Image: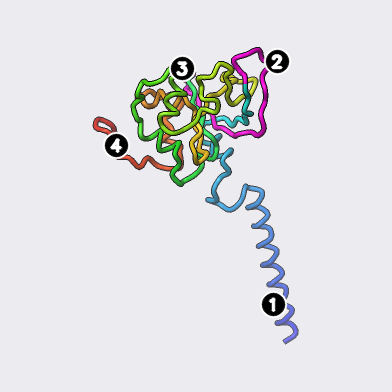
């Protein structure tokens, strides 16, 4: 009886050891197999580059007069190799499977009404119910800034649900021009609209 009990305890400890080893290996590999990837990892594995940008006021003036504001925003930048065009989308907007106003605006491809004076991408953002941080039509200028990159100042359209997308990328997409990447291939929230005639 004592031998059976000792063997049972030894087997229990052996199995516990295996379980701990497997748990440690899974943690070292980034979690459970098939577990969701963090937004920054998802960005890079889909061909993007992660950028952390700061909101800055006064970017139309000399750089020494720029006024950095509080907070930061993570963006995923996709670049089209053939022409160097780029599109940026916030990591949260990219990564969620739930609908966002930014994703819906991108998918809808609503035509610009041509109204207003100033930056057309900012005006288009406003037409869709978003805000281009500083409206895109004030003299001081402003945007989301990161240095040592092609687009130092990014104009981003921010919607009331805080979903965020590149204003120019959104504007061009409304005219069926892809900049950077077709976001429908990487946004986790799928296009809910019927496909247009002539598209696959």
> Residue 195 bears which disc, if any?
4
Labelled pair 3, 2 in contact (Cβ < 8 Å): no
Mark 4 neighbour class, 10 Å CA radius: few under 14, some 14 to 19, many 20 or more:
few
- Point out the tag, 3 or 1, that comes first from the N-terminus: 1
Residue occupying image coordinates x 51% and y 27%: 132
Give the mark toward the camera: 3 or 2.
Answer: 3
**Residue 95, placed above or below residue 20:** above
- Point out the tag, 3 or 2, that comes first from the N-terminus: 2
- Point out the tag, 2 or 4, that comes first from the N-terminus: 2
Is 38 or 89 nearer to us in this picture?
A: 89
Q: CA distance from mark 2 to mark 4?
A: 48 Å
Q: Please provide the residue range marked out in magenta.
A: 58-84
Q: Is residue 130 left or right of residue 150?
A: left
Task: Classify residue 152 by image quadrant.
Answer: top right
- Point out the tag, 3 or 4, that comes first from the N-terminus: 3
Q: Position of residue 199 (x, y in %)?
A: 28, 31
Q: CA distance from mark 3 to mark 4?
A: 32 Å
Q: Is residue 103 left or right of residue 151?
A: left
Q: Which residue is mark 1?
A: 8
Residue occupying image coordinates x 63% and y 52%: 26
Q: Quadrant of the C terminus?
A: top left
Q: Is residue 170 magenta?
A: no
Q: Which residue is mark 2?
A: 64
Give the mark toward the camera: 2 or 1.
Answer: 2
């Amino acid at each position: 009886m004592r031998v059976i009990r000792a063997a049972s305890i030894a087997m229990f400890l052996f199995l516990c050891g295996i379980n701990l080893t497997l748990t440690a290996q899974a943690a070292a590999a980034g979690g459970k197999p098939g577990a969701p990837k963090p937004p920054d990892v998802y960005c890079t594995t889909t061909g993007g580059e992660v950028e952390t940008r700061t909101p800055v006021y006064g970017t139309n003036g000399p750089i020494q007069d720029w006024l950095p504001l509080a907070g930061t925003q993570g963006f995923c930048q996709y670049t089209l190799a053939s022409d160097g065009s780029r599109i940026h989308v916030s990591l949260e907007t990219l990564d969620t499977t739930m609908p966002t106003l930014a994703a819906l605006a991108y998918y809808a491809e609503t035509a610009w009404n041509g109204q207003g004076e100033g930056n057309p991408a900012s005006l288009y953002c406003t037409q869709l119910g978003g805000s281009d941080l500083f409206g895109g039509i004030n003299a001081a200028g402003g945007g989301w800034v990161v240095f040592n990159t092609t687009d130092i100042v990014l104009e981003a359209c921010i919607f009331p649900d805080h979903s965020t997308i590149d204003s120019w990328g959104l504007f061009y997409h409304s005219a069926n021009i892809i900049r950077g990447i077709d976001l429908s291939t990487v946004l986790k929230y799928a296009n809910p609209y019927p496909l247009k005639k002539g598209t696959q």
